[in-house]
Each structure stands twice: as structure tokens, then as C-alpha cells.
Amino acid sequence: MILNPVQPVGLFIFLAIVLIAFATWRLVASRKGSLRLAWTLRILMVILLLIVALRPTIPATGTGPQALGELEVWFAVDTTSSMAAQDYGDGALDSGDPDSLDPDAVEASTRLAGAKADIAAIAEALPGASFSLVTFDAAATRRVPLTTDVSALTSASSVLTQEVTIYSRGSTIDEPVETLATLMKAAAVSKPANSRVLFYLGDGEQTIDTPPGSFEKLAPLIDGGGVLGYGTEAGGRMLSFDGYSDDFANPDYIQDYSQSPVVEALSRIDETALGLVAEQLGVPYFHRTGPGDIDAVLNGISVGELTVEPGTPGGPVELYWIVAIALGLLALTEVARVTLALGELRRASRPLQQKQPTSGGAR
């Protein structure tokens, strides 16, 4: 909601303060209950009048013309606990004490931070494409349905967090396969002319005993993409997450209770597993060690011919009239009160008619 005043806001606020101050003075000075009620209602009327003058408005919801391509970009992002390992980029914190570091540096060192940066870079480089975001840990979840709104995609991806640590029960890297297959098949039916690319972003770490399933069923549904891997062979400590706070000022780490004494658990990238995923999908594999330099990842991917859609018109929605109704009702009570007061004044000022004595004689 925005304000759309007919005059400068400062002028309205100044006048309102003056009127409310005067009405408050009269309210305090009044002794009769009816007068106190009248001045209280007048203060309320001034406040309502100020709101009407400021004209609260809901901005137009229509969309302007859009340039649409024939490309759908699908992101499958690993959000398991291992993606909170701090071995990404120049700020990797795979050793040492991070407590004295800037919280932003702590967050930027995670693998998930790298995935977020790459999603934003890919989206920015492919204007006119449609984007969808699917995340997976214990289960796969569609976060963003197919949309051309890049800001919606980047907003959703920027707030991604790893799974809640205490709920982590192991993960498999093929968790999103069935969800992606269902969604992509539906998209192919809806827009068969579109081409589709899939970007799988993860570290390849399989933390359950069974081997991962195959991604081959997705290969016929896509026309390209890539597997983007994050992490190092040396590994990194994983930030713990309680599900309530994303504050990195006091980082806590997942512990490995299988060791004696207990130590901080390490997560290591599994490039062999990621390479196998890429092979099954028929796309290249890229080891991402820092943000930027996305050209190789997008090599050969094109949005296609752009078509312009006119968008949907929509005007702003004015809300002042709702307040104006309440103001009008209060104004009617004020008119009634003034009318009654004038009637009483007239009756009080009417001269008394005295009867003249009559005299008469006997006839």
C-alpha cells in the first residue's frame, strides 16, 4: 500500500496537529460529559480526515508488456545439511575459528551460498526464459512454479536454508527425480514447443546406505543444462540449523557422534556421483569453486525467439473511501448535535409573552 496525497504530506500533518491540539485542549477544559464526548469525536474526525487526505492506495496489479522466449529453466537444489559446509569460494572456513568473523562471511562460505549465487547469475543471463525452482532434502518441494518473474525466483532462492539439523535422517541425491519428471511432463503437455534445461546444484553426498537411483528418466524431457557441484575433497564443517534463526553471528556446528571423542562432522564433495548424474542426464558437469564466470555453464543454451505479450491492465485501488464512510457517519452526528444546540438557543432567546390584565365595568 502507498500514499497518494493531493497536497504535500507535511501540510496535512501540520494542520492535523493544530486541530487535534485545539480539540484536546477543549476536551480537557470541558466538564460536561456530553461536551467531552463531542470533542473526542471531533479528534477522531480529524484523524479520519487526515487519512482521507493522504489517500491510501494499493498500486496497480496489472503487468506491462513482457518478452517471452521458448526456454524453460529448471533448478533442482540440494538443501540437505551438507550444503551448509563452509568450503565454498575464497571465504572457505574449513578450518579455524569463525566466531570472530563477519556473519556475512560465515554465510558466504557455505555451499548453499554458491548455489544461490549461480541461480541468480543464470536467471540474469537468460532474460525472457521461464524459471522453476525445486529443492530437495528428505523430500522434494517445488518452491517456484514456472514463471518469467526473475525477481520472484531470486527472492525465493535467496532465502533458502538447509534442512533443520535435528530432522536430518540421511539423504539421497536422486530425491528430486520423480517430482521433476511429473512437473516437466505436465509442462511439456502445456507448452510442447518450449525447450527445457535442467540445472542440478548439489554436492553429491549420499548419506544413506542404499545407492542413488538413476536420473536417466529425465534425459528425454530436457534439451540441456548442467550439474553444478559445490565443496572440496578436503571437506568442510557444516553449520547447524534449528529452523528458527538464520543468524550467523554465533555459528554452531553439526557433531559427529560416531567418533570418540566427539568431533565436528565434515562433509566432502562426491564428484564421482555428480559426474554420474551428469552422464545420466546427458549434460556437462561443472565444479563451482566461486561465484561468477557462468559463461561455460550457459554455453549452447538460448532463450530462442522472443515474443511480446501485452500484459494485463490494472489500475490502482483507492482505499480512502472506506475511511470516508466512517468520517461521514461521524459528521452526521455532529450535524445533529449542532442542530439540537441551535434549537435550544432559539427557544432560550425567545422573549417571554406576558399576559396583559383585562379590565371591564359593570354594565
Image (spheres, helix red, strand yellow):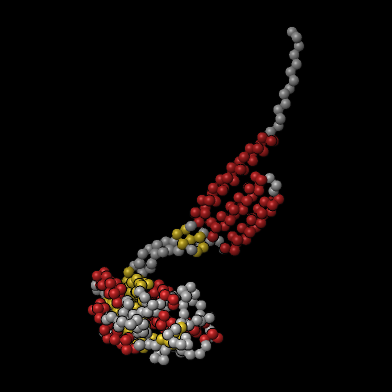
Q: Position of residue 156 (x, y in %)?
A: 41, 73
Q: Looking at the image, which residue is at 48% across and 61% down? A: 57
User: Is residue 167 visible in this depiction of the protein?
Assistant: yes
Q: Looking at the image, which residue is at 32% across and 69% down? A: 309
- Find residue 112 and report its image quarter: bottom left
User: Is residue 147 visible in this depiction of the protein?
Assistant: no
Judged left or right of residue 184, residue 32 is: right
Quadrant location, the C terminus: top right
Q: Position of residue 67 (x, y in %)?
A: 34, 73
User: Along the line of sight, which residue is nearer the eye, 10 or 41?
Assistant: 41
User: Along the line of sight, which residue is nearer the eye, 318 or 250?
Assistant: 250
Figure check: 105 above or below 361: below
Work out which residue is located at the far bottom of the displayed protein and give it.
234
- Find residue 316 and report its image quarter: bottom left
Q: Looking at the image, which residue is at 43% across and 63% down? A: 60
User: Along the line of sight, which residue is nearer the eye, 341 or 184?
Assistant: 184
Figure check: 273 above or below 149: below
